């Protein structure tokens, strides 16, 4: 039986295909969590963080470690730590992958290092092992970034333990922002007595455009600056801009769940008051299904498969109750076809 699409009446999130999303009276848990932020004393949390950093330094050289990609969130985290919380020296850890890196991403990572006088440790995963995992997870689950994303989270923690650094900083608490967790916890579940992993999005209320503006103020660039990649299937030019092929792993969600990055961002913008519900739904209908050709080409080249093989795996895993190919052979959500 085909899905009957149910959407959050406030932001437009699909309620019945997004994993771990809940709803109350037609309002999704991401919107309910957004409301909860109004009752959180973020100023108190910010004062607490300054004291916590000052009293929990365990490495003689580094006050903390920050997992960075060079994106807007990385830039904002480092900015806040140095400008508002007394950090003097931080070790940055970047877990890199093999996709083509953009000039924008390279600039942004260098900007953080130079502006705040940080040391940067770049961890390059064995490219053959990475490709093997991606091909297998693409073939079996159409989730090619699964193993890589696990490494991006875990490797900075291993580095921190090896360096004797107690404090590690990540960006948003994605489980809370996307509605699969009920509370905006400061500490990541990986925290223990020896290592504390802190969500900076639990210290400063996370909003994509606000964090983008804070990053811009200290030298962060979006894709417009170098005009190097005209993205398709996106509605902004400042998130996930570090490498080209990575975005294809995000797009694969569309044929399984009926949404990808456009839905994620449009619904966030609605919750944040940046656009109306109607504007968000219009953008989703127009762009959410679009597969970026540059990203697809780079993704396939990097992991050593043909675009035809990629297409075959997409066809294999597509939820045909939810999506259908249009007259041009493009996968579309059934309920959004004219």
Image (spheres, rainbow, N blue to C red):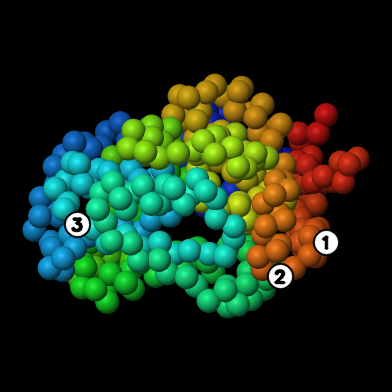
**Which of disc 3 and disc 1 is earlier in sequence?**
3
Q: Residues within 10 Å of mark 3 (few under 14, many from 20)?
A: some
* In the image, farthest residue toward the right: 327
| CA separation in Å, label 1 and label 2 | 12 Å
In the picture, the disc for residue 89 is 3
The vertical placement of 62 against 84, above or below, is: below
Left or right, 81 with respect to 272, comes to left
Q: Position of residue 243 (x, y in %)?
A: 56, 53
Q: At numbered mark 2, what does the secondary structure look like: helix, strand or loop?
A: loop
- Image quarter where the C terminus lies is top right
Question: Are the two marked residues, 1 and 2, in contact with CB atoms closer than 8 angstroms?
Answer: no
Q: Position of residue 275 (x, y in %)?
A: 52, 23
* 237 vs 13, nearest the viewer: 237
Q: At numbered mark 1, what does the secondary structure look like: helix, strand or loop?
A: helix
Q: Residue at x 30, y 50 (%)?
A: 114
| CA separation in Å, label 2 and label 3 | 40 Å
Q: Residues within 10 Å of mark 1 (few under 14, many from 20)?
A: few
Q: At numbered mark 3, what does the secondary structure look like: helix, strand or loop?
A: loop
Of circles 1 and 2, the one toward us is 2
Q: Residue at x 28, y 46 (%)?
A: 115
Q: Position of residue 196 (x, y in %)?
A: 24, 63
Q: Position of residue 106 (x, y in %)?
A: 46, 52
Report if residue 184 is visible in the image. Answer: no
Left or right, 113 with respect to 41, comes to right
Q: Residue at x 68, y 40 (%)?
A: 232
Question: Are the two marked residues, 2 and 3, in contact with CB atoms closer than 8 angstroms?
Answer: no
Circle 1 residue: 308
Report if residue 124 is visible in the image. Answer: yes
Picture quadrant of residue 333: top right
In the picture, the disc for residue 304 is 2
């Amino acid at each position: 039986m085909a899905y009957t699409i149910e959407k959050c009446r406030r932001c437009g999130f699909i309620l019945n295909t997004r994993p771990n999303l809940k709803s109350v009276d037609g309002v999704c848990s991401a919107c309910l969590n957004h409301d909860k932020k109004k009752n959180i004393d973020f100023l108190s949390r910010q004062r607490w963080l300054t004291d916590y950093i000052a009293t929990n330094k365990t490495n003689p050289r580094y006050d903390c470690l920050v997992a960075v990609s060079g994106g807007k969130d990385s830039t904002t985290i480092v900015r806040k730590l140095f400008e508002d919380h007394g950090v003097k020296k931080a070790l940055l850890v970047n877990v890199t992958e093999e996709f083509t890196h953009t000039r924008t991403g390279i600039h942004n990572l260098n900007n953080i290092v130079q502006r705040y006088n940080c040391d940067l440790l770049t961890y390059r995963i064995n490219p053959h092992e990475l490709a093997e995992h991606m091909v297998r997870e693409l073939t079996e689950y159409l989730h090619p970034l699964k193993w890589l994303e696990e490494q991006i989270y875990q490797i900075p923690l291993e580095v921190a333990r090896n360096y004797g650094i107690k404090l590690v900083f990540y960006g948003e608490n994605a489980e809370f922002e996307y509605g699969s967790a009920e509370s905006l916890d400061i500490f990541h579940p990986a925290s223990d007595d020896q290592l504390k992993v802190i969500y900076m999005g639990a210290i400063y209320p996370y909003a994509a455009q606000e964090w983008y503006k804070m990053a811009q103020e200290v030298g962060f660039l979006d894709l417009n600056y170098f005009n190097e990649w005209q993205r398709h299937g996106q509605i902004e030019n400042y998130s996930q801009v570090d490498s080209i092929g990575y975005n294809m792993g995000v797009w694969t969600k569309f044929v399984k769940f009926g949404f990808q990055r456009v839905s994620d961002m449009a619904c966030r913008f609605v919750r944040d008051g940046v656009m109306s519900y109607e504007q968000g739904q219009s953008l989703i209908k127009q762009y959410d299904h679009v597969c970026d050709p540059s990203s697809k080409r780079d993704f396939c080249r990097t992991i050593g498969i043909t675009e035809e093989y990629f297409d075959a795996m997409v066809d294999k895993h597509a939820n045909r109750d939810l999506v259908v190919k249009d007259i041009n052979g493009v996968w579309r959500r059934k309920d959004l076809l004219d």
